[in-house]
Image (tube, rainbow, N blue to C red):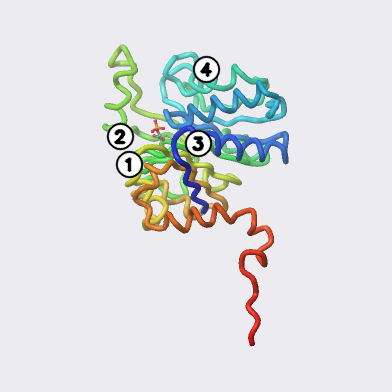
Amino acid sequence: MEVIIKKDYDDVCSESAAIIEEAWRRKNNLVLGFATGKTPLGLYEKLVEFYRQGRIDFSAVTAFNLDEYVGLEASHPQSFAHYMDHHLFRHVNIRKEDIFRLSGRPPDIDEHCRAYERKVRDSGGIDIQILGIGKNGHIAFNEPGSSLSSRTRLKILTPETVAAIRPFFQDEKEVPRFCLTMGIGTILETKTALLLASGKDKAGIIARAVEGPLTASVPASALQLHARAIFVIDEAAASKLTKRDYYRWAYENKDRALDPLKIIPLKTKG
Ligand code: PGA
């Protein structure tokens, strides 16, 4: 696990965009997993900027959305499909046929979820999965208690989540109670998990996810099992981590670590 601590939210987004740009340079047909929420918005702005500057070309990129509310059409302004179109896809040259989404109204939910898993596998797997983290530790819509090996499936939203999203819907009847979400097992199979967090209200849960015990009660703690999890967080979100100095030191020495003999010179006796 790598923890990168940046000064503020803007730097978190710049660093994350740079990680994606660097990955794209190495593999133009990158498979990216996209998250919604407030946190990744600044990252998506940077990706649009990079596209306009010619730094990233999305024509060979494949996209997978992480989750979706059950009951909403893709065109609904609160759907995650709409969010991704609005904030990223419509501004870059990604091909429509290379954007995969969970449907909010599939005819057969179980089959739809299984087919989504198959599509992820057929794409060669997700190279970089962008993630936010809920204050309760959820990643995607894997709320506390979710199985650490769960796959894409239907989840019931917690009463807190339903209350939090209520203001975004005009009609009570429209407010989603269910969602489809990639599972924690699905996320653990991605090649890189890139989690962004900002602000002091995330500090407690970041500390539990990064340094606390591995537990289904904090779904993001499952990333401790991930082969390559990168937390890009700002000072405020990092403020409760006990090993902050080590994370900073490791980040500062990362380039030198390419040649470990330079940072840990062998001591000779006598
Ligand atoms: P936020 O949501 O980015 O809006 O804080 C994160 C999440 O709930 O996953």
Mark 1: which amino acid?
Asn
Q: CA distance from mark 2 to mark 4?
A: 26 Å
Residue 98 pos. (x, y %): 66, 26
Judging by the rendered image, the residue that carries numbered circle 1 is 136
Mark 3: which amino acid?
Asp
Q: Nearer the viewer, mark 2 or mark 1?
A: 1
Judging by the rendered image, the residue that carries numbered circle 3 is 11
Mark 4: which amino acid?
His
Q: CA distance from mark 4 to mark 1?
A: 27 Å
Taking the spot 51% from the left edge, 22% from the top edge, the residue there is 81
Mark 4 or mark 2, which is nearer the start of the sequence?
4
Q: CA distance from mark 2 to mark 3?
A: 32 Å
Q: Nearer the viewer, mark 2 or mark 4?
A: 4
Residue 130 vertical placement versus 1 (above, below): above
Q: Is residue 47 left or right of residue 148?
A: right
- Where, quadrant-wise, is the C terminus in this rendering? bottom right
Residue 59 pos. (x, y %): 71, 25
Residue 106 shows in this picture: no
Q: CA distance from mark 4 to mark 3?
A: 23 Å
Mark 1 or mark 2, which is nearer the start of the sequence?
1
User: Is 51 in front, or is 117?
Assistant: 51
Give SS at disc 3. helix
Q: CA distance from mark 1 to mark 3?
A: 24 Å
Queried on whether the Cβ of the residue with tag 1 lies below 8 angstroms from ligand 1, the answer reads no
Give SS at disc 1. loop
Residue 86 disc label? 4
Q: Is residue 43 left or right of residue 267?
A: left
Give SS at disc 2. loop
Judging by the rendered image, the residue that carries numbered circle 2 is 158
